[in-house]
Image (spheres, grey):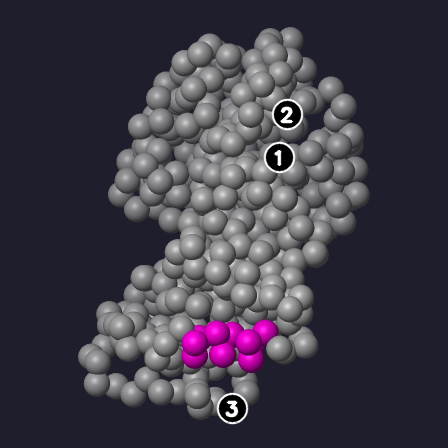
Amino acid sequence: MTSKNFEDLIQEPLILQAIQDLGFTTPSDIQQQAIPEVLKGKDLRASAQTGTGKTAAFMLPALCRLLKKSSTRGPKILVLVPTRELAMQVVEETTKLSRHLRHITSVFICGGIPYHVQNRKLSRNFDILIATPGRLIECLEEKRIHLSNLEMLILDEADRMLDMGFIEPVEYIASMAPKSRQTLMFSATYDEKVLSLANSLLTNPTEIIVEKKAANYDLIEQHIHKTNNLEQKYKFLDEILSDPNIEKAIIFSSTQKQTEQIADKLCDGGRITAAALHGGMNQQQRTRTMKKIRNGDIKVIVATDVMSRGIDIPEVSHVINFDLPKTLDDYVHRIGRTGRAGAKGKAFSFASSRDYQMLDEVERFIDDPSDSSSKPQSRGRSRGRSRSRSPQPRRRSR
């Protein structure tokens, strides 16, 4: 890396003031690599995980571009995201970074927002549009938005958008924007589908890869508890959550219904503040829950994988897999919610006899995090231990 501070990347005093107000001093890896390229006007294909600072990596140069005042109507910057929650996070960070830029305005639209509220926002002139694909297409078809003056198209969490079936909507939206636009694509992974989309939308892009830091897993103490029934899972859960050192915990469950059941059970008696977070909740419920999480009013979040991806929840000390995920990638993503920024964390996984194949993969990862692509082993090996990647002695599971 050549840059050491934000002054090396950004020359706009009002943007630098906002960065200073937020207490940021050193740009992250993705920010150091992406910002200079975006400011040069280049298309970008970046691989970076949630929590790496990628929102600022695209929004800071986008704001710099907007300071070159344009009199045209309609959005100049479009940020396309897969979910409402991610849209809200981008809006929140954009508001903070543009706090001293009074003439720059932003709007976000997504499913769940009442149409009369949305239409009122769209009736005004604005510079930045943050949107989910489905709702944006509705607005384009109803001619409430036009993209003829768009200067920059940003695709955030592109792999998730394709996983959710948004490839055709994304292609349609891109076709409505000028070919002369600048396009930035951010994705945690690039499989054949994502690469194909990138090749069709980007022109001679700069490629940036920010590797996951495997050292973080050394800070995560990982445990496996074998369980025979639901009652035993709740018993283990109660024991884990009785730890007074828990700052914030995320419990992963496989179904929306079960997230509600777990959260309700934890809240009984008033000892633990918990809330469910899943795709079946309406916009108002999810907004209220996310606000409580960010304010520190909720200590335990019970979520599904789909709901949690792309949402950055800081200061998570414990991750609990109430159900084992279906893939090792999902396991790694889940436990990566803790052990960040040099802090230690703990991850607990409940496994039943039906999880033997996934359990083998998880145990191999615990023994060697660098071997995350290894194939499942045979069923014959012992799986009765609680394994730990911390320097502490390994413990036997119960």
Above or below — where is 302 with respect to 393?
above
Q: Residues within 10 Å of mark 1 (few under 14, many from 20)?
A: many
Q: Magenta includes 384?
A: no
Query: Label 3 amino acid?
Result: Pro
Residue at left offset 55%, top offset 61%: 264
Left of 219 or right of it: where is 368?
Answer: left
Q: Main secondary structure of the magenta part?
A: helix
For the residues labelled 3 and 1, say whether their Cβ atoms are less than 8 Å apart: no
Residue at left offset 35%, top offset 33%:
166
- The region drawn magenta spans 231-241
Residue 360, horizontal then vertical, whole percent: 29, 76
Instruction: Examine the rendering and report whether any part of residue 173 can be seen.
Output: yes
> Toward the viewer: 269 or 144?
269
Q: Kindly identify the amino acid type of the residue bearing the numbered disc 2.
A: Ser
Q: Is 156 displayed left or right of 23 in the figure?
A: left
Q: Which residue is mark 1?
A: 91
**Mark 3 or mark 1, earlier in chain:** 1
For residue 371, what is the image quadrant? bottom left
- Give the residue pinned by disc 2: 106
x then y, percent, for residue 199: 32, 32
Q: Are marks 2 and 1 in contact (CB under 8 Å)?
A: yes
Task: Classify 231 as above or below 151.
Answer: below
Q: CA distance from mark 2 to mark 3?
A: 52 Å
Is tag 2's residue or tag 1's residue first in the polypeptide sequence? 1
Residue underneath mark 3: 393
Quarter in which the C terminus is drawn? bottom left
**Looking at the image, residue 7 lies above or below residue 266:** above
Under mark 1, the amino acid is Val
Q: Is residue 239 magenta?
A: yes
Q: Nearer the viewer, residue 28 or 396?
A: 396
